[in-house]
Amino acid sequence: MHPSIAFARRWWLAAQFPIGANNTVNLTQIVLPPGPVPNTGRDDLDYSLGFELGQALLKLRRPWPALPGQEVEIDDGPDYLANLSSRIGYGLAVDWVRMGFLGAVETMTNVALNKPDMLSAVASRLDRLTDPAIRARIAYLWEAGEPLPTVFDDGFDSVTMATTTPRVR
């Protein structure tokens, strides 16, 4: 494995997503290792890793299922999108990661505006996306070199996170 890919793999696998822990929700629950997001040199992998980070942001906005009429209070102090985008870093080295991250948010916007009938399915899939599941999905990207279905894909339902967790070397 090329040294830059090995470093990027370690960086991503160190990320934590304890979203909704202790019945609280805030931006600090997307815990990225120090420094800018590393580039792998593989545009498809960088885009997919960014998309996983974008799904984590969506999960942060829906940390647990809400009962009908119930609102989840979220600390809106910082602008989550701008804050996470700046934590990715800037420049050509992270453009594909940023595009993947923003691609997840753009896809959610498209679903909400143009395919509202899909919203309940997407929400249900986000409800099943846990910290261990996000980490397993990222680990799977490294092991298999290909993304799993996203919360926007029907195939997401057929993915059992426990069976997709690869061995981590």
Image (cartoon, rainbow, N blue to C red):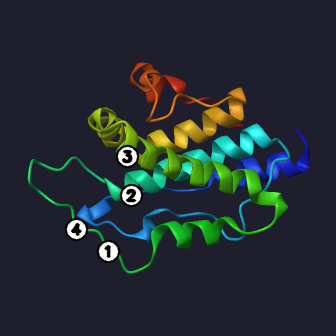
Which quadrant is home to the C terminus? top right
* Residue name at image x 11 percent, y 48 percent: 67
Quick one: label 2, few (<14), some, or many (20+) residues within 10 Å? many
Q: Quadrant of residue 117?
A: top left
Tag 3: amino acid = Leu
Give the labeled residue for mark 4: 73
Question: With respect to residue 8, does 163 lie above or below?
Answer: above
Tag 1: amino acid = Asp
Question: With respect to residue 86, does 18 lie above or below?
Answer: above
* Residue name at image x 56 percent, y 29 percent: 148
| Callout 3 touching callout 1 (CB < 8 Å) | no
Evaluate whether residue 64 shows in this view: yes
Tag 4: amino acid = Glu
Q: Secondary structure at mark 4?
A: loop
Give the labeled residue for mark 2: 60
| Callout 4 touching callout 1 (CB < 8 Å) | yes
| Image position, residue 94 (x, y; %) | 76, 58
Q: Secondary structure at mark 2?
A: helix
* Residue name at image x 22 percent, y 46 percent: 65
Give the mark nearest the N terminus, 3 or 1: 1
Q: Residue furthest left?
A: 69
Give the mark nearest the N terminus, 4 or 2: 2
Give the mark nearest the N terminus, 3 or 2: 2
Give the labeled residue for mark 3: 113
Taking depth in this image into account, of 144 and 111 the one nearest to the observer is 111
Disc 4 to disc 2, C-alpha distance: 11 Å
Q: Image check: 164 left or right of 33?
A: left
Q: Secondary structure at mark 1?
A: loop
Q: Quadrant of residue 48?
A: top right
Give the labeled residue for mark 1: 75
| Image position, residue 159 (x, y; %) | 45, 23
Taking depth in this image into account, of 13 and 109 the one nearest to the observer is 109
